């Protein structure tokens, strides 16, 4: 995942690189996603999210539709 | 014979301890010393942890490329958090470093488009601070992320 100065720059990059289906998201959503995904990574009892948990998280963050489909 | 599940847990915890202590992903030799095991056994554990997507190995080696979200070595994304500078392979991981350290963070990166302008993102509690309009972008759909996790 990359950072872009604006949605316009993100669109320019995906057009130039041939990734027409790329999806941008707000920094706020990215931060919520990162916190939910990684906040326990250094804990001894860490475990990977199950597929169901990941799907529920994406739904909660509004990351829905074919691009965000995990199964 | 050592239980591989328990051994892999010990290896994972040793890696996490190194990161907590100094913000750096350790080399295999250091992990082997920490868990007091031969490097070959730790390399096998690394391979299992990578297969389980707990981390990514440097291609063709038994060294860690990224104990996600923490990358080994310099990358395009630096995160200042908890009094140290850490590296991340991507913006999501950069944000994830502050999350994993439970600390506020300053992400230093740049626009991936041709302008390449430096970008800073401040993460503090629930708040995110950056220039107006800055966005993140996934190139590949979620189901393909692990097909090329470094690029995604």
Image: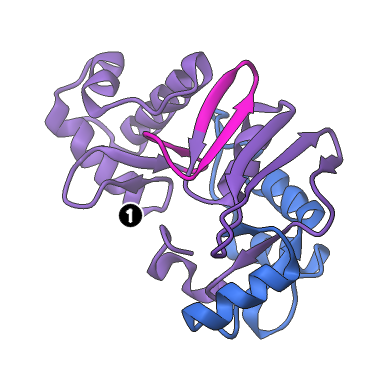
Chain colours: A blue, B purple
Density class for disc 1 (Cα within 10 Å; few <14, some 14-19, many ≥20) is few
Q: Position of residue B49 (x, y in %)?
A: 35, 45
Residue B7 lies left or right of residue B129; in this view the side is: left
What element does badge 1 sit on?
helix
Image position of B123 with respect to B17: above or below: below
Q: Quadrant of the N terminus of chain B?
A: top left
Q: Position of residue B141 (x, y in %)?
A: 56, 76
Image position of B105 with respect to B47: above or below: above
Of residues B68 and B117, the one nearer the viewer is B117
Of residues B6 and A47, the one nearer the viewer is A47
In the picture as drawn, the residue positioned furthest to the front comes out as B115
Identify the residue position indicated by label 1 in the image.
B51
Residue drawn at 17 percent across, 32 percent down: B41
Residue drawn at 27 percent across, 27 percent down: B27
Image position of A14 with respect to A30: above or below: below
The region drawn magenta spans B68-86
Residue B32 lies left or right of residue A45; in this view the side is: left
Residue drawn at 56 percent across, 55 percent down: B116
Of residues B128 and A61, the one nearer the viewer is B128
Tell me if residue B150 can be seen.
yes
Q: Let me know if residue B65 is in the magenta part.
A: no
Q: Let me know if residue B71 is in the magenta part.
A: yes
Q: Position of residue B111 (x, y in %)?
A: 61, 56
- Quadrant in which residue A15 is drawn: bottom right
Tell me if residue A69 can be seen.
no
Q: Position of residue B38 (x, y in %)?
A: 14, 23
Residue B32 lies left or right of residue B122; in this view the side is: left
Image position of B42 with respect to B129: above or below: above
């Amino acid at each position: 995942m990359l950072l872009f100065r604006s949605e316009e720059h993100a669109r320019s990059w995906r057009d130039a690189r041939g990734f027409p289906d790329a999806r941008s998201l707000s920094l706020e959503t990215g931060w919520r996603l990162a916190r939910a995904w990684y906040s326990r990574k250094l804990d001894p009892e860490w475990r990977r999210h199950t597929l169901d948990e990941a799907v529920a998280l994406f739904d909660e963050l509004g990351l829905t539709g074919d691009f965000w489909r995990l199964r | 014979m050592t239980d591989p599940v328990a051994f892999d847990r010990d290896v994972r915890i040793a890696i996490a301890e190194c990161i907590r202590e100094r913000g750096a992903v350790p080399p295999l030799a250091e992990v082997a010393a920490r868990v007091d095991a031969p490097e070959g056994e730790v390399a096998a554990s690394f391979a299992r942890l990578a297969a389980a997507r707990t981390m990514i190995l440097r291609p063709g080696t038994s060294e860690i490329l990224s104990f996600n979200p923490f990358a080994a070595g310099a990358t395009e994304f630096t995160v200042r958090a908890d009094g140290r500078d850490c590296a991340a392979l991507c913006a999501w991981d950069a944000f994830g470093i502050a999350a994993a350290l439970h600390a506020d963070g300053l992400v230093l990166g740049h626009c991936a488009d041709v302008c390449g302008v430096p970008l800073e993102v401040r993460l503090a509690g629930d708040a995110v601070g950056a220039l107006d309009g800055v966005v993140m972008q996934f190139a590949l759909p979620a189901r393909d992320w692990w097909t090329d996790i470094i690029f995604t």
